[in-house]
Amino acid sequence: MTEKKRISEEALVRFATKIIMALGAPEERARVTAEILTAADMRGISSHGVAGGTGLRELVERIRKDAIDPKAIPSVKQNENWAVATMDARAGIGPAAAMDATRLAGDLAEKYGIGKVYVHNANHFGAACVYVEALTERGLAGRATCTSGAWMKPFGGNRIRLGTNPIAWGAPAGDQAIVIDVAMTQRAVSPAIRASRAGEEIPPDYFLHENGEVMSGRVAYDELIKGSVLPLGGTQFGYKGSGLAVLIDLDGVIGGGSTQHIPTLRVQPDARITQTIEAWRLDALYHLEDVKKRLAEAVRDIKSCGGPEMLLPGEREARNKTDAEKYGIPYEASQWEALDMIGGWLGVEPPAAMQEL
């Protein structure tokens, strides 16, 4: 099978829900998690989708190692009349806990004008933009950050300490949401791993050898995982990504997160991370309709600087989502194989492809 075949959103959600329930999760939390993983696929972020490296396979493997508690329900700590809260995810399923935090941050913002929720003792939550878009759909601006297993040396440092520490940030503007979702490294780690395993070249200024030299060309997997990913900005300007990653780490500490190096899941399957979800109202200072009008004007002015292919943050993902809603989610051979394999592990029949349109 070489061509991509499409799968419906609901079929993928239904399959993922059954898998997660078979792992011991309550139906509601399984469904929420399935919807979040599928939302990444809908936007073309397949690395964080159902069949991606941080999707169902990770959940199955880590739950089977007792590194994730599928039944865990987060607990919330909040001072009365404060717009900030902290949530202990209790080592539960990452996406479900993060969506709990997103809803609470939105509720706090609607009540106080701004809301922030920290999540500690947590697990990987998938694509950060999904939570920001959940807030923009409520008419709020939002931001989500997450610490992660360490793959990066601080700029100028000699020891791996920082994670990719992604940030997503967005606001509704006119008839669209402007949402950026980026790692604080040159790129996520997973593309380098895939390229290495496939015998393909990795881009320059992306990874460093264990000895500190920049990797290039084809790199053996065993050699790659001994190295470190470069911070956003690369060898010359990496203080930018490194500095932002440090502040994301420190912000997590404020909310109860780890003060120490976080091992990768490859090294320690039960490693815990921290997330922060922020939301704020558009009408905190000015009339809502005036703010909406000015945001739309600003977007039009920015877009006037380029042609039709100049995309603003989130536009490519929005196009993918529109296409997937109309025709189904495109899945390639390796993704279908992953669904078959995971379904076989748990006795859940994999979904069928849609008829090609």
Image (cartoon, grey):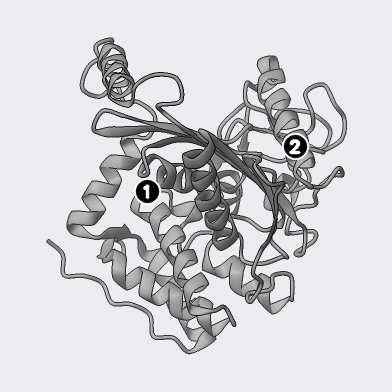
Image check: 65 left or right of 57? right
Q: Few, some or many C-alpha atoms within 10 Å of disc 1 (few <14, some 14-19, many ≥20)?
A: many
- Label 1 sits on a secondary structure element that is loop
Q: Position of residue 81 (x, y in %)?
A: 64, 42
Most extreme residue toward the left is 357
Three-letter code, disc 1:
Gly
Q: Position of residue 234 (x, y in %)?
A: 65, 22
Label 2 – label 1 distance at C-alpha: 28 Å
Residue 138's image quarter?
top left
Q: Position of residue 200 (x, y in %)?
A: 53, 45
Q: Few, some or many C-alpha atoms within 10 Å of disc 2 (few <14, some 14-19, many ≥20)?
A: many
According to the picture, the residue beneath numbered tag 2 turns out to be 249
Residue, x 72% and y 46% (percent of image)?
A: 79
According to the picture, the residue beneath numbered tag 1 turns out to be 44
Residue 215's image quarter?
top right
- Label 2 sits on a secondary structure element that is helix
Up the image or down, 73 lies above or below 310; here it is: below
Up the image or down, 26 lies above or below 283; here it is: below
Image check: 147 left or right of 203? right
Image check: 129 left or right of 201? left
Q: Position of residue 58 (x, y in %)?
A: 60, 66
